[in-house]
Amino acid sequence: MKKHLFSFILLSAILMSQAFAQAPDTIWTYKYNGPSNYDDNANYCAIDNTGHLYVTGSTLVSGSGNNYITIKIDAATGDTIWIRTYNGPANDHDYANCCTVDTFGYLYVTGTSSNGANTDYLTIKYDGNTGDTIWTRRYNGSADGTDKAYGCAVDNNNLYVTGVSFGSGNFFTIKYNTTTGDTIWTHRYGPGSGSDYANACAVDSLGNLYVTGYIDNGVNRDFCTIKYNSSTGDTLWIKKYNGPANGNDYAHGCAVDGSGNLFVTGSVYNGTNNDYLIIRYNPTNGDTVWTRSYNGAANQNDVARGCKVDQYGNLFITGASNNGSNSDILTIKYNPLNGDTIWTCRYNIPSNAHQGAMSCDIDQAGNLYVVGYNDNGTNDDILAIKYNTATGVTGKPELPSTNHKICLEQNYPNPIKKYTNISYQLPIAGYSSLVVYNIAGQKINTLVNERQDAGVYNINWNGRDESGNHASAGIYFYQLKIGDNIITRKMTLIR
């Protein structure tokens, strides 16, 4: 009887996960065609704490080349709140490539700006409410050559900007004080080849900075990802990836989840064309946890650029996928623990024109925003799409029907100083418990003791017992139990 009941529950869970693994509903689409009716492209987007969407990129203006363009959009309605542009002193080409918002609502936009002879990093701090410029910072490298910023990230009072700066090591990262715009440190990496580009960066809650891009290995291009101590700029580890076909592989985006896990995405050469590639790294030592690639049905070029993780750990990747005649926006939701695909969503406008995604972000309600470009038949327009990824689901990553394993991951960080995150997945709904024990087997704290749906969960432990007192330094065990299944792992608490 128990066996039949378990089979029924398992089958129900499978059917439920299949029903939930549907492509997201489109809430609205936003398009912008500038006054000059030339090419307008979105390169990045960011959501602030109030749910407003910022989109940044470039707009082609007659007589002055490309200008920065930044648009603030009401995320609820898709209406424009304000638009700001930037035309550099050379009245030449200026391209905004990335943006980020801090917890105070200030917006930072970075990219490349012509100085008349070459290009500089150009970073702007805006008041998110009004769109007023607070400060601008320009960086011209020591080689007085090409300097292009592609990625940025913010934590507390610090802004990190990364890109390519020709000189002795072209991966070039700057740490700024967000209040004053003063430079705190700079760091270079690479053999100095013109083919070395840092394209994105992300910072975790522990003060670690990750920079990713691609580097010339002498024959082709490889993924290159670096972990820095964000306080000092010291390098902690460097990891490179050369795909199986030994061709050109380009990393374009990265994201860090609440447990500190790092995800890097871009394109990998498969011997014929390019595929999406996603790598999950262990943040402690940089070891690869898993890799996943995506080759579209047309077996043409597929290039991933945007990478985001939401508050539940769901991983979203977006980019451009060739459908045989042009490119579509292709977004994929992955299970972050094992890299399995949960759903794919392809966007192709009725005219079957050329379009692609460059970036994505997620708000606290589970809405996904994808931005890029759209061919209107004459030129490119800025395109933004809002998806409801939580339609009919709880918001936690659903498990694919082919995976029925209970999984308990190693906590991170470990050793523990103040807090740690514990991730686990349940293949079926059931009564589950997650308990912390000391080395003597005494219960210290019960973190979970309830019925839970199938899915992926992230639980924090603050190093305290059930009375709220600090637990002593030492060895502890955390135990996950669902039904007759028990998994136990060890962790270390230091003071």
Image (tube, rainbow, N blue to C red):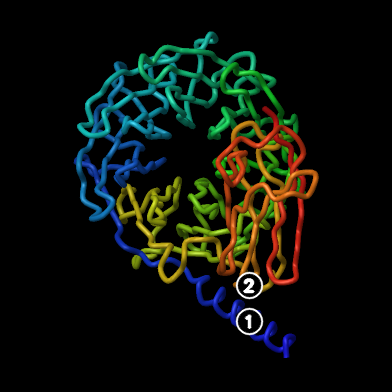
Say which residue label 2 marks: 428
Q: Position of residue 288 (x, y in %)?
A: 73, 44
Is residue 166 in sight in this rendering? yes
Q: Do labels 2 and 1 touch, CB within 8 Å? A: yes
Say which residue label 1 marks: 9
Identify the mark at residue 105; answer none if there is no mark. none
Q: Amino acid at mark 1?
A: Ile
- Give the residue drawn at x 34%, y 41%: 48
Disc 2 to disc 1, how far (Cα)? Answer: 7 Å
Q: Position of residue 371 (x, y in %)?
A: 39, 49
For residue 172, above or below residue 257: above
For residue 455, which quarter of the picture?
bottom right
For residue 138, above or below residue 225: above
Front-lying residue, 78 or 338: 338
Q: Is residue 330 found left or right of 382 in the rendered image?
A: right
Q: Position of residue 291 (x, y in %)?
A: 70, 51
Is residue 221 in sight in this rendering? no
- Give the residue drawn at x 44%, y 52%: 356
Q: Position of residue 106 (x, y in %)?
A: 32, 30
Name which of mark 2 and mark 1 comes first in the sequence. 1
